[in-house]
Image (cartoon, rainbow, N blue to C red):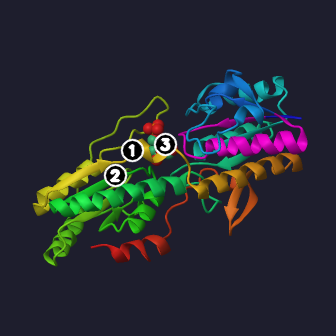
Protein backbone atom coordinates (compact mmCIF):
# COMPACT_ATOMS: atom_id res chain seq x y z
CA UNK A 1 0.00 0.00 0.00
CA UNK A 2 1.11 3.57 -0.66
CA UNK A 3 -0.32 6.75 0.83
CA UNK A 4 0.30 10.44 0.28
CA UNK A 5 0.57 13.06 2.99
CA UNK A 6 0.47 16.85 2.75
CA UNK A 7 0.70 19.86 5.04
CA UNK A 8 -1.48 22.79 3.91
CA UNK A 9 -2.33 26.35 4.98
CA UNK A 10 -0.28 28.37 7.44
CA UNK A 11 2.48 26.37 9.13
CA UNK A 12 2.42 25.67 12.83
CA UNK A 13 4.60 23.93 15.42
CA UNK A 14 4.08 20.17 15.40
CA UNK A 15 3.67 19.49 11.68
CA UNK A 16 6.94 17.56 11.60
CA UNK A 17 5.92 15.55 14.66
CA UNK A 18 2.80 14.37 12.79
CA UNK A 19 4.82 13.56 9.65
CA UNK A 20 7.24 11.52 11.79
CA UNK A 21 4.48 9.59 13.61
CA UNK A 22 2.62 8.77 10.38
CA UNK A 23 5.77 7.59 8.62
CA UNK A 24 7.05 5.57 11.54
CA UNK A 25 3.85 3.59 12.15
CA UNK A 26 3.16 3.25 8.41
CA UNK A 27 6.61 1.85 7.67
CA UNK A 28 7.39 -0.12 10.82
CA UNK A 29 4.00 -1.65 11.55
CA UNK A 30 2.38 -1.96 8.15
CA UNK A 31 5.03 -1.65 5.45
CA UNK A 32 3.05 1.22 3.93
CA UNK A 33 5.02 3.53 1.64
CA UNK A 34 4.53 7.27 2.25
CA UNK A 35 4.82 10.02 -0.37
CA UNK A 36 5.16 13.47 1.19
CA UNK A 37 3.68 16.04 -1.21
CA UNK A 38 5.56 19.33 -1.29
CA UNK A 39 3.98 22.70 -0.56
CA UNK A 40 0.49 21.53 0.30
CA UNK A 41 -2.04 20.94 -2.45
CA UNK A 42 0.40 22.48 -4.95
CA UNK A 43 2.49 19.29 -4.65
CA UNK A 44 -0.50 17.11 -5.52
CA UNK A 45 -1.45 19.27 -8.51
CA UNK A 46 2.13 19.38 -9.80
CA UNK A 47 3.06 15.81 -8.75
CA UNK A 48 5.92 17.08 -6.58
CA UNK A 49 6.68 14.78 -3.66
CA UNK A 50 9.43 13.06 -1.71
CA UNK A 51 9.41 9.53 -0.38
CA UNK A 52 9.40 9.54 3.40
CA UNK A 53 11.13 6.94 5.52
CA UNK A 54 12.02 6.63 9.18
CA UNK A 55 15.74 6.92 8.60
CA UNK A 56 15.42 10.17 6.67
CA UNK A 57 13.20 11.79 9.29
CA UNK A 58 15.55 11.44 12.25
CA UNK A 59 15.55 14.52 14.50
CA UNK A 60 12.42 16.23 13.16
CA UNK A 61 10.16 15.64 16.19
CA UNK A 62 11.01 18.95 17.93
CA UNK A 63 11.56 20.98 14.77
CA UNK A 64 9.07 23.74 13.94
CA UNK A 65 7.69 24.35 10.46
CA UNK A 66 7.21 21.52 7.98
CA UNK A 67 9.92 19.66 6.10
CA UNK A 68 7.43 19.30 3.24
CA UNK A 69 6.71 23.00 2.88
CA UNK A 70 3.20 24.37 2.85
CA UNK A 71 1.04 26.82 0.92
CA UNK A 72 -2.50 28.08 0.74
CA UNK A 73 -2.82 26.64 -2.76
CA UNK A 74 -6.34 25.29 -3.19
CA UNK A 75 -7.34 23.02 -6.10
CA UNK A 76 -10.96 24.18 -5.88
CA UNK A 77 -9.83 27.64 -7.03
CA UNK A 78 -8.76 26.26 -10.43
CA UNK A 79 -11.03 24.98 -13.16
CA UNK A 80 -10.74 21.18 -12.96
CA UNK A 81 -8.29 21.42 -10.04
CA UNK A 82 -10.13 18.99 -7.77
CA UNK A 83 -10.42 16.40 -10.54
CA UNK A 84 -6.72 16.84 -11.33
CA UNK A 85 -5.84 16.20 -7.68
CA UNK A 86 -7.83 12.94 -7.72
CA UNK A 87 -6.28 11.86 -11.05
CA UNK A 88 -2.75 12.61 -9.89
CA UNK A 89 -3.18 10.60 -6.70
CA UNK A 90 -4.44 7.74 -8.83
CA UNK A 91 -1.59 8.02 -11.35
CA UNK A 92 0.97 8.04 -8.54
CA UNK A 93 -0.59 4.92 -7.06
CA UNK A 94 -1.61 6.54 -3.79
CA UNK A 95 -4.32 4.47 -2.14
CA UNK A 96 -5.06 7.25 0.33
CA UNK A 97 -4.09 10.77 1.34
CA UNK A 98 -3.52 12.14 4.83
CA UNK A 99 -4.26 15.86 4.81
CA UNK A 100 -2.85 17.90 7.67
CA UNK A 101 -4.43 21.32 7.72
CA UNK A 102 -6.94 23.83 9.01
CA UNK A 103 -10.46 24.42 7.80
CA UNK A 104 -9.57 25.52 4.24
CA UNK A 105 -7.23 22.59 3.62
CA UNK A 106 -9.68 20.12 5.16
CA UNK A 107 -12.58 21.55 3.12
CA UNK A 108 -10.55 20.82 0.03
CA UNK A 109 -9.86 17.28 1.30
CA UNK A 110 -13.60 16.76 1.71
CA UNK A 111 -14.27 17.80 -1.88
CA UNK A 112 -11.46 15.63 -3.23
CA UNK A 113 -12.95 12.80 -1.15
CA UNK A 114 -16.39 13.37 -2.66
CA UNK A 115 -14.80 12.94 -6.09
CA UNK A 116 -13.50 9.51 -5.16
CA UNK A 117 -10.16 9.97 -3.38
CA UNK A 118 -9.60 8.29 -0.03
CA UNK A 119 -8.74 10.99 2.49
CA UNK A 120 -8.08 11.30 6.22
CA UNK A 121 -7.81 14.71 7.93
CA UNK A 122 -5.59 15.86 10.80
CA UNK A 123 -6.62 19.18 12.40
CA UNK A 124 -3.85 21.78 12.52
CA UNK A 125 -3.78 25.49 13.30
CA UNK A 126 -2.61 27.76 16.07
CA UNK A 127 -6.04 29.42 15.83
CA UNK A 128 -7.74 26.30 17.32
CA UNK A 129 -10.87 27.03 15.27
CA UNK A 130 -11.46 23.60 13.71
CA UNK A 131 -14.78 22.11 14.85
CA UNK A 132 -15.08 18.62 16.30
CA UNK A 133 -11.78 18.59 18.17
CA UNK A 134 -11.16 20.10 21.58
CA UNK A 135 -7.76 21.23 20.37
CA UNK A 136 -5.86 21.53 17.15
CA UNK A 137 -2.13 21.00 17.41
CA UNK A 138 0.01 24.14 17.42
CA UNK A 139 -2.47 26.00 19.60
CA UNK A 140 -0.85 25.04 22.90
CA UNK A 141 2.56 26.19 21.63
CA UNK A 142 1.18 29.51 20.36
CA UNK A 143 -0.49 30.21 23.71
CA UNK A 144 2.72 29.41 25.56
CA UNK A 145 4.75 31.73 23.32
CA UNK A 146 2.22 34.55 23.69
CA UNK A 147 2.08 34.07 27.47
CA UNK A 148 5.87 34.16 27.82
CA UNK A 149 6.00 37.39 25.85
CA UNK A 150 3.17 38.97 27.84
CA UNK A 151 5.07 38.12 31.04
CA UNK A 152 7.99 40.10 29.67
CA UNK A 153 5.78 43.05 28.74
CA UNK A 154 4.43 43.31 32.30
CA UNK A 155 7.78 44.37 33.75
CA UNK A 156 8.50 47.04 31.17
CA UNK A 157 4.88 48.27 31.40
CA UNK A 158 5.23 48.66 35.16
CA UNK A 159 8.55 50.48 34.88
CA UNK A 160 7.05 53.10 32.57
CA UNK A 161 3.42 53.23 33.76
CA UNK A 162 2.23 52.28 30.31
CA UNK A 163 -0.63 50.46 28.70
CA UNK A 164 0.88 47.67 26.62
CA UNK A 165 -1.30 46.49 23.78
CA UNK A 166 -0.39 43.01 22.52
CA UNK A 167 -1.76 41.89 19.18
CA UNK A 168 -1.90 38.12 18.79
CA UNK A 169 -3.05 35.93 15.90
CA UNK A 170 -6.68 34.91 15.67
CA UNK A 171 -8.32 35.60 12.37
CA UNK A 172 -11.95 34.75 13.07
CA UNK A 173 -11.80 33.53 16.64
CA UNK A 174 -9.96 34.50 19.79
CA UNK A 175 -8.75 31.24 21.34
CA UNK A 176 -5.08 32.30 21.49
CA UNK A 177 -6.02 35.76 22.82
CA UNK A 178 -8.39 34.40 25.45
CA UNK A 179 -5.99 31.76 26.78
CA UNK A 180 -2.93 34.03 26.69
CA UNK A 181 -5.00 36.83 28.23
CA UNK A 182 -6.03 34.64 31.15
CA UNK A 183 -2.55 33.14 31.57
CA UNK A 184 -0.84 36.52 31.22
CA UNK A 185 -3.17 38.50 33.50
CA UNK A 186 -4.56 40.88 30.85
CA UNK A 187 -6.62 43.88 31.93
CA UNK A 188 -8.64 43.38 28.74
CA UNK A 189 -8.81 40.84 25.94
CA UNK A 190 -10.56 41.77 22.71
CA UNK A 191 -11.65 38.93 20.44
CA UNK A 192 -13.59 38.67 17.16
CA UNK A 193 -16.50 36.84 18.79
CA UNK A 194 -17.33 39.87 20.98
CA UNK A 195 -17.14 43.24 19.21
CA UNK A 196 -15.72 45.76 21.68
CA UNK A 197 -16.72 49.23 22.78
CA UNK A 198 -13.49 51.26 22.92
CA UNK A 199 -15.08 53.91 25.17
CA UNK A 200 -16.03 51.27 27.71
CA UNK A 201 -12.51 49.78 27.54
CA UNK A 202 -11.00 53.24 28.17
CA UNK A 203 -13.37 54.11 31.03
CA UNK A 204 -12.54 50.89 32.78
CA UNK A 205 -8.80 51.29 32.23
CA UNK A 206 -9.05 54.80 33.70
CA UNK A 207 -10.85 53.47 36.75
CA UNK A 208 -8.25 50.73 37.16
CA UNK A 209 -5.45 53.28 37.04
CA UNK A 210 -7.30 55.59 39.51
CA UNK A 211 -7.38 52.65 41.89
CA UNK A 212 -3.59 52.63 41.90
CA UNK A 213 -2.58 50.35 39.03
CA UNK A 214 -0.44 52.22 36.55
CA UNK A 215 0.24 49.54 34.02
CA UNK A 216 -2.13 47.41 32.01
CA UNK A 217 -1.88 44.71 29.39
CA UNK A 218 -4.54 44.70 26.68
CA UNK A 219 -4.53 41.60 24.46
CA UNK A 220 -6.08 42.11 21.03
CA UNK A 221 -6.78 39.28 18.60
CA UNK A 222 -5.84 40.44 15.09
CA UNK A 223 -9.43 39.83 13.96
CA UNK A 224 -11.06 41.71 16.87
CA UNK A 225 -13.71 44.18 15.75
CA UNK A 226 -15.15 47.31 17.34
CA UNK A 227 -18.90 47.68 17.73
CA UNK A 228 -20.28 49.26 14.55
CA UNK A 229 -19.84 53.03 14.48
CA UNK A 230 -17.44 53.22 17.45
CA UNK A 231 -14.02 53.20 15.76
CA UNK A 232 -13.01 53.58 12.12
CA UNK A 233 -11.24 50.50 10.77
CA UNK A 234 -9.35 50.97 7.49
CA UNK A 235 -10.12 48.37 4.77
CA UNK A 236 -7.60 45.55 4.44
CA UNK A 237 -5.55 44.16 1.58
CA UNK A 238 -5.83 40.52 0.45
CA UNK A 239 -3.13 37.99 -0.43
CA UNK A 240 -2.90 35.99 -3.67
CA UNK A 241 -5.48 33.47 -2.36
CA UNK A 242 -8.00 36.20 -1.53
CA UNK A 243 -7.17 35.81 2.17
CA UNK A 244 -7.56 39.13 3.98
CA UNK A 245 -4.19 40.32 5.32
CA UNK A 246 -4.91 41.24 8.91
CA UNK A 247 -2.83 43.22 11.35
CA UNK A 248 -3.28 46.75 12.56
CA UNK A 249 -6.04 46.28 15.12
CA UNK A 250 -3.50 46.49 17.96
CA UNK A 251 -2.18 49.82 16.68
CA UNK A 252 -5.70 51.15 16.29
CA UNK A 253 -6.63 50.16 19.83
CA UNK A 254 -3.35 51.53 21.24
CA UNK A 255 -3.80 54.97 19.71
CA UNK A 256 -7.50 55.08 20.66
CA UNK A 257 -6.57 54.36 24.28
CA UNK A 258 -3.93 57.12 24.34
CA UNK A 259 -6.27 59.61 22.67
CA UNK A 260 -9.14 58.92 25.04
CA UNK A 261 -7.24 58.45 28.33
CA UNK A 262 -3.95 60.27 27.90
CA UNK A 263 -2.16 57.10 29.05
CA UNK A 264 1.03 56.34 27.24
CA UNK A 265 0.66 53.14 25.24
CA UNK A 266 2.95 50.87 23.26
CA UNK A 267 1.90 48.19 20.82
CA UNK A 268 3.60 44.83 20.30
CA UNK A 269 2.51 42.65 17.40
CA UNK A 270 3.55 39.06 18.12
CA UNK A 271 2.87 37.94 14.55
CA UNK A 272 4.56 34.87 13.14
CA UNK A 273 6.73 34.37 16.23
CA UNK A 274 3.65 32.52 17.50
CA UNK A 275 3.92 29.99 14.69
CA UNK A 276 7.66 29.47 14.68
CA UNK A 277 10.04 27.24 16.55
CA UNK A 278 9.75 24.11 18.58
CA UNK A 279 6.38 22.68 19.72
CA UNK A 280 5.59 22.31 23.42
CA UNK A 281 5.65 18.83 24.97
CA UNK A 282 1.83 18.88 24.94
CA UNK A 283 1.74 19.52 21.20
CA UNK A 284 4.40 16.89 20.50
CA UNK A 285 2.27 14.33 22.31
CA UNK A 286 -0.92 15.47 20.57
CA UNK A 287 0.79 15.37 17.16
CA UNK A 288 2.14 11.91 17.82
CA UNK A 289 -1.32 10.71 18.87
CA UNK A 290 -2.92 12.31 15.79
CA UNK A 291 -0.30 10.77 13.49
CA UNK A 292 -0.77 7.29 14.93
CA UNK A 293 -4.56 7.67 14.75
CA UNK A 294 -4.37 8.82 11.12
CA UNK A 295 -2.51 5.66 10.11
CA UNK A 296 -4.92 3.55 12.17
CA UNK A 297 -7.75 5.18 10.16
CA UNK A 298 -5.93 4.36 6.90
CA UNK A 299 -5.51 0.73 7.90
CA UNK A 300 -9.16 0.54 9.01
CA UNK A 301 -10.21 2.12 5.68
CA UNK A 302 -12.21 4.73 7.59
CA UNK A 303 -11.92 7.28 4.78
CA UNK A 304 -13.54 10.69 4.84
CA UNK A 305 -12.85 11.14 8.54
CA UNK A 306 -10.75 13.48 10.66
CA UNK A 307 -8.89 12.46 13.80
CA UNK A 308 -9.91 14.58 16.77
CA UNK A 309 -9.29 15.07 20.48
CA UNK A 310 -12.41 14.56 22.56
CA UNK A 311 -12.46 13.99 26.33
CA UNK A 312 -8.76 13.12 26.25
CA UNK A 313 -9.29 10.37 23.65
CA UNK A 314 -8.49 10.45 19.96
CA UNK A 315 -11.60 9.71 17.93
CA UNK A 316 -12.56 9.77 14.24
CA UNK A 317 -15.37 11.99 13.00
CA UNK A 318 -16.72 12.51 9.47
CA UNK A 319 -14.98 15.42 7.72
CA UNK A 320 -18.40 16.52 6.51
CA UNK A 321 -19.35 17.30 10.13
CA UNK A 322 -16.31 19.52 10.56
CA UNK A 323 -15.63 21.71 7.56
CA UNK A 324 -17.18 25.13 7.22
CA UNK A 325 -17.91 25.31 10.95
CA UNK A 326 -15.84 27.72 12.98
CA UNK A 327 -15.27 26.75 16.59
CA UNK A 328 -15.66 29.93 18.63
CA UNK A 329 -14.41 30.61 22.14
CA UNK A 330 -17.06 29.36 24.56
CA UNK A 331 -19.08 31.80 26.64
CA UNK A 332 -18.09 29.71 29.65
CA UNK A 333 -14.42 30.57 29.07
CA UNK A 334 -14.70 34.13 27.80
CA UNK A 335 -17.51 35.65 29.84
CA UNK A 336 -17.45 33.06 32.60
CA UNK A 337 -13.71 33.31 33.30
CA UNK A 338 -11.62 35.74 31.20
CA UNK A 339 -13.98 38.75 31.44
CA UNK A 340 -14.22 38.42 35.21
CA UNK A 341 -10.60 39.53 35.44
CA UNK A 342 -10.97 42.54 33.14
CA UNK A 343 -10.43 46.05 34.53
O1 LIG B 1 -2.84 29.79 10.22
C1 LIG B 1 -3.62 30.69 10.87
C2 LIG B 1 -2.94 32.03 10.90
O2 LIG B 1 -1.77 31.97 11.67
C3 LIG B 1 -3.86 33.12 11.38
O3 LIG B 1 -3.88 33.26 12.77
C4 LIG B 1 -3.31 34.33 10.69
O4 LIG B 1 -4.31 35.29 10.48
C5 LIG B 1 -2.84 33.77 9.37
O5 LIG B 1 -2.55 32.42 9.59
C6 LIG B 1 -1.64 34.50 8.82
O6 LIG B 1 -1.37 33.98 7.57
P1 LIG B 1 -0.03 34.26 6.74
O7 LIG B 1 1.05 33.41 7.32
O8 LIG B 1 -0.39 33.84 5.37
O9 LIG B 1 0.28 35.70 6.90
Asked whether residue 110 appears in the rendered view, the answer is: no
Range drawn in magenta:
4-33
Q: Earlier in the sequence, mark 3 or mark 2?
A: 2
Q: Are marks 1 and 2 in contact (CB under 8 Å)?
A: yes
Residue drawn at x 43%, y 70% is 334
Q: Which residue is mark 1?
A: 271
Depth check, front residue: 24 or 234: 24
Asked which secondary structure carries label 2, the reply is strand
Q: Is residue 180 magenta?
A: no
Q: State yes or no: residue 31 in magenta.
A: yes
Query: In the image, is the residue at mark 2 within 8 Å of ligand 1 by its beta carbon?
Result: no
- Crowd tier of the residue under label 1, counting other residues whose Cα lies within 10 Å: few below 14, some 14–19, many 20 or above: some
Dots 3, 2 in contact, CB < 8 A: no
Q: Nearer the viewer, residue 110 or 334?
A: 334
Q: What residue sits 81% from the left and 45% below the top?
A: 25
Q: Secondary structure at mark 3?
A: loop
Pick the front one: 142 or 99: 142
x, y (%) of residue 249? Answer: 30, 49
Q: Which residue is mark 2?
A: 167
Residue at image x 55%, y 34%?
Answer: 72
Amino acid sequence: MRIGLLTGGGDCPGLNAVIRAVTRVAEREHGIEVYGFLDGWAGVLEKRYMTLDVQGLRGILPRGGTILGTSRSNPSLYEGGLEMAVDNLDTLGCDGLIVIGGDGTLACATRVGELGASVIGVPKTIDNDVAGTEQTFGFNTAVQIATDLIDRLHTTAESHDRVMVVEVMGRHVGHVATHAGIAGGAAFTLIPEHPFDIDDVCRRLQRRHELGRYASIVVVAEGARPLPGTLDVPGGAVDQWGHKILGGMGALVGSAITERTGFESRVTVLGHVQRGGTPTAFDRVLCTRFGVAAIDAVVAGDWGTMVALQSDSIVRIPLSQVVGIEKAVSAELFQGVAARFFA
